[in-house]
Image (cartoon, grey):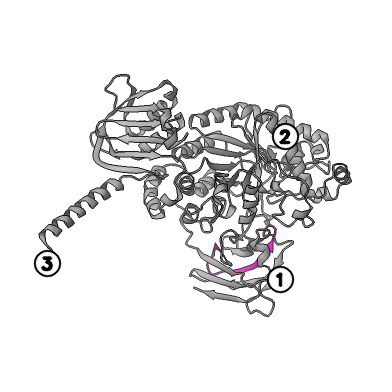
C-alpha cells in the first residue's frame, strides 16, 4: 500500500497538472509564442480603457477594430484606471528585437510592451487569440507572461495576379489574414506572360493591351480546352497606393515583382520592339514556360526597364524590387545575330552570362535609387532546368551583384550553399514545400508545417544569411476567388508558424489543435474551405526508387525534375485528359533515394503514366527512365497503364524495372 504522504503528493501533482492543462488548453495561439508562462488568475473585462503613446495611434485603432466582434468598447484613457496599456520601451530591444513584444496579463491589467510599434501590433494579435468568451457581454483572458519574437525577419506570402486578376478587395482580405498570423511581407507578382497588372503612365499600352487576353487555358498546360472568355484587369497607381497604405497599417511590406528578361510576353505584346524577335505577338492564352524574352542588346529596352522601375520605385516604399529572372529560355538569343554581336562586344561567353550581365545592369539602377534587387535563384547562372542545354557553370564569367537577395525556389542544398558562400542573403521558398498551387495531397498541411528554411548541417556562420521564407500562390489554375482560398487556407497558418516560432518550439500536434480555433474564425467566411475529397476519386501514391540508377546523380544535384506525367479519363466528359500543370512532382530536396508523390484520380478508370527526368516534367525533351516494352503493364506509346479500382493504391517504381502495385 502507498504511504499517505505519497498519496497526498500524487493528488497534489494531479491537481496541479489539471490546472495547468486547463490553462494551456485556452492558449490556442498561431503562431505559437517562443516563451510563455501561464498563471492561475483570469482577467474579465467589459470595456477596454487604453493608455497609449502617440506613436501607437494605429495600434490603438487596430485594437478597437478587432474588439468590435466581441462587443467590447475600446476607449482612450489617460488616467490611472486604464486596464490596458500599449507601450514603447527601447530597453526591450535586446530581449525581443524590433518585431517582438512582451505581453503581461494579470487579474487587473493588460500590458503590451515592445521596442517598435509593429511589436505592439503583434502583441495585440496574440491578445485577441487569447480571448475566452464569458457571460454578461464580458470577455476573459488567462493570466500570462509572454516574451516573444520571430524566428525569421522575412515571413512572406506571394500572390500571382498576372495569370488571374483578383482585385484590391481580395488583397485587402489577404492582408488582414496575414497580419493576424504575424506575416510581414506581401510579395505581389504583377507582371508575367499572361498579363501586365500595374499602370505605368509612360507606357500606357502595357495596360491597354498587356492587361487583356482573349481566352484562358484550362485543365493543364497540355490541354487544348479554353474558357472561351476574355480575361483582363489591372491596378491604377492610385489603387496601388491605396493597397500600400492599407498594408502599412498592418506592418506588412509590399514587394512588387516585375518579371525580366523572360516571362515578358504581355509587355512584348504591348510593345513588340521589346522582344528579341521584334515581331507582333498577342498576350498568351496558354500557360507554361514560353519563349518570349527581352532583347537585351537594345539600349531602348534598358530605357524602358528603367522607366518602368522608376515609376514602381516611386510607388513602393519597401526598398526591395523583385525582378523575377526565372525560367528564361535562351532559344531566341541563340538564334539572334544581334545577340551574338552583343556577346562578342561585351566578352560574354554564355547565354547565362548575358542574363547575369543584364541583371547586374538592372541591379545597379535599382541600387542607385537606394533600393535592393531580389530575384529567383535562376539569376545566379546555374542551369536549373536543362532546356538551355549548352550552358555549363564553368562557362560563366559574370558574377551576380553581391547585394542581390536570392529567392531560392529550386535546386539542391549545394546550390543554396553556393549562393550563401557568395555573400547573398537568401529567402528559402523551395517549391516542394512552399508552392500553394500544389495540391493538398502532395503538399499536405503537415509537410508545410515541417518545412525548415535552414538546411540541415549548415555552417552556423551562414545561417543568418537565410533571412526567412515565402509561400507562393501561383495563379494559373485558380480562376475563382474560392479556388484561391481553397489553396491558401489553412496552409497559410502553417507557414506563419514556420516563420515565427523557433524550430525547437514547434509541435505539429499542438498546431493542429490550435488550428481548430483559427478555422472556427474562418468557417463562416469566404476563407474557409472544407477541402472534402470527391467520393468518385481515390488517392494514388507513387514511390520511385532511384538508388543504383544511372540517372540519380542529375536528379540528386537538383539539375533535373523528376515527375510523373500522364492521362486519365474524365468521368464527367468521358474524355482523355492530361493531368494538371506539372503533373505529380516528385520531391528533389530531402530524400534517401526514394521519391514520392500523390494524386487523386477517378475510380474504376484506366490510368496511364510515365516517369520523366526532364527540365520541367514535360512530355517533350524528356528521358523515360523506367521499364521497357517487356513489362506487362505497358500501354500505348510505352506508357504504363493501370486499372484503378475503388481503393487507394500504392505504385512502387524501381528505376529500370516494372511496376509493383499494392493497396
Is 247 placed left or right of 569 in the picture?
A: left
- Verify CB contact (< 8 Å) between mark 1 and mark 3: no
For mark 1, give the secondary structure.
helix
Q: Are marks 2 and 1 in contact (CB under 8 Å)?
A: no
Q: Residue 637: image x %, image y %?
A: 71, 71
**First in residue order: circle 2 vs circle 1:** 2
**For the point 32% across and 28% down, which residue is it?**
84
Residue labelled with disc 3? 1
**Where 200 falls versus 260 (above or below)?**
above
**Residue 586 makes an appearance in the image:** yes
The residues tagged by marks 2 and 1 sit, at their Cα atoms, a distance apart of 51 Å
**What residue lies at 70% left-to-right and 40% top-to-bottom?**
401
User: Which residue carries the number 1 mark?
Assistant: 637
Secondary structure under tag 3 reads: loop
Residue denoted by label 2: 364
In the rendered view of the protein, which quadrant contains the N terminus?
Answer: bottom left
Magenta stretch holds residue 608? yes
Q: Which residues are magenta?
A: 595-616
Q: Nearer the viewer, residue 464 or 47?
A: 464
Instruction: Give percent across and percent down for residue 187.
Output: 58, 39
In the figure, 178 relative to 62: above or below?
below
Give x and y (percent) for residue 406: 63, 44
Relative placement, left or right, of 131 versus 324 is: left
Amino acid at each position: 500500500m502507498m504511504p499517505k504522504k505519497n498519496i497526498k503528493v500524487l493528488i497534489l501533482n494531479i491537481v496541479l497538472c489539471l490546472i495547468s492543462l486547463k490553462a494551456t488548453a485556452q492558449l490556442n495561439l498561431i503562431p505559437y509564442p517562443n516563451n510563455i508562462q501561464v498563471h492561475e488568475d483570469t482577467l474579465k473585462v467589459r470595456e477596454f480603457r487604453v493608455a497609449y503613446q502617440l506613436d501607437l495611434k494605429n495600434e490603438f485603432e487596430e485594437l478597437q477594430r478587432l474588439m468590435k466582434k466581441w462587443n467590447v468598447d475600446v476607449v482612450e484613457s489617460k488616467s490611472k484606471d486604464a486596464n490596458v496599456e500599449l507601450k514603447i520601451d527601447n530597453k526591450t530591444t535586446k530581449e525581443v528585437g524590433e518585431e517582438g513584444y512582451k505581453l503581461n496579463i494579470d487579474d487587473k491589467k493588460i500590458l503590451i510592451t515592445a521596442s517598435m510599434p509593429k511589436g505592439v501590433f503583434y502583441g495585440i494579435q496574440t491578445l485577441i487569440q487569447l480571448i475566452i468568451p464569458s457571460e454578461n457581454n464580458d470577455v476573459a483572458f488567462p493570466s500570462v507572461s509572454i516574451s516573444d519574437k520571430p524566428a525569421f525577419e522575412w515571413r512572406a506570402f506571394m500572390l500571382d495576379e498576372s495569370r488571374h486578376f483578383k482585385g484590391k478587395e481580395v488583397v485587402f482580405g489577404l492582408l488582414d489574414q496575414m497580419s493576424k498570423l504575424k506575416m510581414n511581407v506581401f510579395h505581389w507578382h504583377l507582371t508575367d506572360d499572361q498579363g501586365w497588372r500595374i499602370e505605368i503612365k509612360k507606357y500606357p499600352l502595357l495596360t491597354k493591351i498587356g492587361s487583356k487576353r482573349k481566352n484562358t487555358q484550362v485543365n493543364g498546360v497540355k490541354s487544348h480546352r479554353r474558357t472561351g472568355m476574355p480575361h483582363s484587369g489591372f491596378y491604377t497607381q492610385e489603387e496601388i497606393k491605396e493597397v500600400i497604405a492599407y498594408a502599412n497599417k498592418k506592418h506588412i511590406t509590399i514587394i512588387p515583382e516585375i518579371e525580366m528578361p523572360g516571362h515578358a510576353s504581355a509587355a512584348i505584346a504591348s510593345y513588340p520592339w521589346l522582344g528579341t524577335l521584334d515581331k507582333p505577338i498577342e498576350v498568351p492564352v496558354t500557360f507554361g514556360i514560353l519563349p518570349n524574352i527581352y532583347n537585351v542588346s537594345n539600349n531602348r529596352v534598358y530605357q524602358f526597364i528603367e522607366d518602368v522601375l522608376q515609376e514602381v520605385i516611386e510607388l513602393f516604399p519597401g526598398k526591395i524590387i523583385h525582378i523575377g529572372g526565372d525560367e528564361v529560355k535562351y532559344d531566341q538569343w541563340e538564334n539572334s545575330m544581334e545577340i551574338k554581336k552583343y556577346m562578342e562586344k561585351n566578352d560574354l561567353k554564355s547565354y547565362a552570362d548575358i542574363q547575369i550581365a543584364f541583371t547586374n545592369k538592372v541591379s545597379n539602377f535599382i541600387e542607385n535609387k537606394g533600393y535592393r534587387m531580389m530575384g529567383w535563384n535562376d539569376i545566379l547562372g546555374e542551369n536549373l532546368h536543362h532546356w538551355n542545354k549548352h550552358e555549363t557553370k564553368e562557362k560563366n564569367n559574370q558574377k551576380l551583384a553581391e547585394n542581390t537577395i536570392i529567392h531560392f525556389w529550386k535546386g539542391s542544398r549545394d546550390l543554396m550553399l553556393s549562393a550563401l558562400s557568395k555573400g547573398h542573403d537568401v529567402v528559402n521558398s523551395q517549391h516542394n514545400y512552399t508552392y500553394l498551387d500544389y495540391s493538398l495531397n502532395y503538399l499536405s498541411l503537415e509537410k508545410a508545417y515541417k518545412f525548415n528554411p535552414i538546411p540541415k548541417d549548415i555552417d552556423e556562420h551562414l545561417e543568418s544569411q537565410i533571412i526567412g521564407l515565402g509561400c507562393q500562390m501561383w495563379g494559373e489554375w485558380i480562376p475563382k476567388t474560392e479556388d484561391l482560398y481553397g489553396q491558401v487556407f489553412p496552409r497559410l497558418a502553417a507557414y506563419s508558424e514556420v516563420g515565427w516560432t523557433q524550430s525547437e518550439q514547434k509541435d505539429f500536434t499542438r498546431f493542429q489543435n490550435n488550428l481548430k480555433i483559427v478555422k472556427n474564425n474562418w468557417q463562416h467566411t469566404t476563407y474557409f474551405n472544407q477541402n472534402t475529397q470527391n467520393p468518385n476519386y481515390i488517392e494514388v501514391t507513387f514511390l520511385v526508387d532511384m538508388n543504383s540508377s544511372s540517372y540519380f546523380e542529375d536528379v540528386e544535384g537538383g539539375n533535373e525534375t523528376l515527375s510523373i506525367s500522364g492521362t486519365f479519363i474524365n468521368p464527367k466528359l468521358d474524355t482523355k485528359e492530361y493531368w494538371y500543370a506539372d503533373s505529380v512532382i516528385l520531391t528533389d530536396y530531402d530524400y534517401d533515394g526514394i521519391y514520392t508523390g500523390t494524386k487523386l484520380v477517378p475510380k474504376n478508370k484506366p490510368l496511364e503514366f510515365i516517369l520523366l527526368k526532364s527540365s520541367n516534367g514535360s512530355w517533350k525533351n524528356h528521358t523515360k527512365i523506367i521499364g521497357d516494352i517487356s513489362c506487362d503493364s505497358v500501354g500505348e506509346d510505352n506508357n504504363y497503364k493501370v486499372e484503378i479500382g475503388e481503393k487507394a493504391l500504392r505504385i512502387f517504381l524501381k528505376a529500370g524495372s516494372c511496376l509493383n502495385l499494392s493497396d
